[in-house]
Image (cartoon, rainbow, N blue to C red):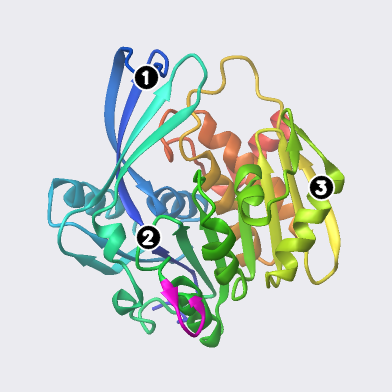
Amino acid sequence: MTNAKDGIAVAGTLIADVFYEIDTYPAQGLLTNIRDMSFNIGGSGNLILDLAKLDDGLPVKVCAIVGNDSSGDLLMETLANYPNVDTESITREGNSSVTHVMNAKDTKQRTFFFHPAASDIFDETYIDWEKIDARIFHLEYLLLMKKVDAPDTEYGTHGARILHDAKQRGMLTSVDIVSEQSDRARTVVTAALAYTDICTVNELEAEAITGIAVAKNGSWDKERVQEAMHALKNMGVGKWIVIHSPEGGYGYDCQAATLKYVPSLCLPDGYIKGSNGAGDAYCSGILYGAYQGMELEEAMELATACAACSLSENNGTDGMRPCSQVWKLREQLK
């Protein structure tokens, strides 16, 4: 039996990914070739499996809704392969959430078509706090869950209420969001950040939340990064803020008021097979670093190496390795 406060709880959107390898992403009305197709776990599943692989002794407690369908069976069978993943708080009902992922071979860029289903009905009524009590509570993804993103008269959004209740139980809270072309982040995510300890986002998501463009033409603007960090801290983030991009990541320790930068690793030509799940892999490194009591910079170094592992394979999780091997890869490529 593990201590109730052991492990990391991951709640939110558990998705089945239908992964398509295509020649290029076509302009509207044009055709492209599908060269390969596969089915994988996605959404919070990427993060769950990354954490499970990083440390097979780490309890990973999952709270989500999975459909009574073939996609749901696939998800449950995949999670069952990892003894340290606790699926007791997964509810089976309705239809599973499914993402159709288009991965262009020429640009290595991904495009997503999402069928919400279970994601639209998940809320706090599906959370048994006693079962998922952990050291860290991670909610994934904001802007992708209809009820979680819905307004709440007391906390701003239902997601903010969930994070508040997790903090009340003594858990460190963390959020991840999706990259969305809308202005919802300014309200939905801002409400949640008031009850968030660790915020890990990419450069586009940071801009969506704060309105501050932290990068120009693919290069960081350090002054704007600092502005965005301060804006996110003022929204309520209590421990770490991390903004990452393909070039590297900036991190801000809210308690020490220090800014850190960790560049991406030097990956050899032909190393990158796909970018699906790289952001989740990066987030897994940040969460595992926080869980293990690392300083922010060390956690970012681990996260950068985790993302590099993910990039070595087409899908979101096959490239992840045990923590010792992730550090070894970093030494080889830094």
The residues colored magenta run 151-156
Kindly indicate the quadrant of the structure image that contains residue 104: top left
Q: Earlier in the sequence, mark 2 or mark 1?
A: 1
- Image vertical order of residue 65 relative to residue 328, above or below: below
- Can residue 57 be seen at all in this image of the molecule? no
Quickly name the residue at label 3.
224
Tell me, for residue 145, which label it has, or none.
2
Q: How many marks?
A: 3
> Of tags 2 and 1, which is closer to the observer?
1
Is residue 154 located in the magenta-colored stretch of the structure? yes
Kindly check if marks 3 and 1 are in contact, taking CB atoms under 8 A apart as contact.
no
Q: Residue at x 64, y 35 (%)?
A: 329
Q: Which residue is mark 1?
A: 28
Quadrant containing the C terminus in the rendered view: top right
Callout in the foreground (3, 1): 1
**Which image quarter holds the N terminus?**
bottom left
**In this view, 247 is above or below 297:** above
Does residue 42 appear left or right of residue 219 in this picture?
left
